[in-house]
Amino acid sequence: MASSGEHHPAFEEYCECIFELQEDDVDVIQARIVERLGVSRPAVSEMIRRLEADSLISITGTTIRLTAAGTTLAQQVVRRHRLAERFLTDILGLSWAEAHHEAGRWEHVMSTNVEVAMDRLLGSPTTCPHGNPIPGSEYLAPDAHRLIDLAVGDGFTVSRIPEELEFTPGLLDFLESAALLPGRAGTVTATSADGTMTVEIAGSHVDVGAFASARILVTA
C-alpha cells in the first residue's frame, strides 16, 4: 500500500467515501457523496474533477468508480481507520461512536510503522468493531443476510454493521447500548408492516427501525 502523506487528506477522504459506498453496494454518484460527507454539491463536483485529473477515479455517465490507484489509496485509509477503531475500543475502551470519530483523524496521520505495530498488538484483526472487513487482512466473508429478511422465530448472530449506519447520527450509540454487536446472538420476536423488527438480544427486547434492519447483516 502507498505510504502516508502522498495525497492531501481531502483526496483520501473522498476515495475512502467512494470505497465504502461501493462496499455497501450503493451506486456511487455525486449525490451519494454529498449525503455521506455532508458537503455542498459544488464542492463535491470540484473535488471529483480533481480526483479524475489525478487518475484516482473514472466516470461513466453519472457513476463514479475508483481506479486501481484510487482503490489502493482508499484501502490504505480504510485499513488505518478500522485498525484505529479496533485499538480505540479494544485497548482504550472508547465507545463505538467516539472511536469512529477519533479514527477519522488518525487515518490521515498514521505512519506505516504505527500501522504495523498496531496490527501486531491487536493480533491482526480481520474486522473493525462493527464487523466491517479490514483491507489487507485475512477476512473471509460469511454467508450473511439482512436482518429485515428474517421471519419471526428466526435466530441470528450479528455479523456486520455497514458503514452507512455509522454515519447516521445517534445510531452507533443505540446499537452499542442495545447489544446489537457483531458476534451477539438474538431472535426475531416481531415484525411490523413498516419494516421495524423486534429482536430479543442479551436478555432484552429491542425495536430496530426499517432503515437499520434493512442494512444490518446477520448470519443464521
Image (tube, rainbow, N blue to C red):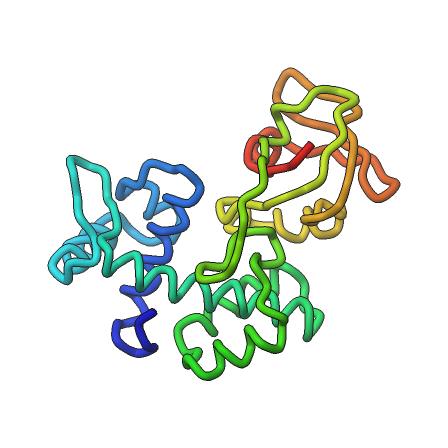
Question: Toward which corner of the image does residue 119 lie, by quadrant?
Answer: bottom right
- Measured as percent of width and height from the top left, residue 59 is found at 17, 44
- Measured as percent of width and height from the top left, residue 58 is found at 17, 48
Q: Is residue 199 left or right of residue 107?
A: right
Depth check: give the residue in front, 51 or 144: 144
Disc tally is: 0
Q: Residue furthest left?
A: 53
Q: Residue furthest right?
A: 203
- Measured as percent of width and height from the top left, residue 189 is found at 79, 25
Image height of 77 relative to 196, above or below: below
Q: Residue at x 23, y 60 (%)?
A: 69
Question: Toward which corner of the image does residue 151 lie, by quadrant?
Answer: top right
- Measured as percent of width and height from the top left, residue 170 is found at 61, 50
Q: Quadrant of the C terminus?
A: top right
Image height of 20 relative to 69, above or below: above
Q: Residue furthest top?
A: 193
Depth check: give the residue in front, 100 or 111: 111
Q: Residue at x 85, y 39 (%)?
A: 204
Q: Residue at x 67, y 53 (%)?
A: 173
Q: Residue at x 31, y 72 (%)?
A: 2
Q: Quadrant of the N terminus?
A: bottom left
Image height of 112 relative to 199, above or below: below
Depth check: give the residue in front, 174 or 217: 217
Q: Is residue 180 left or right of residue 200?
A: left
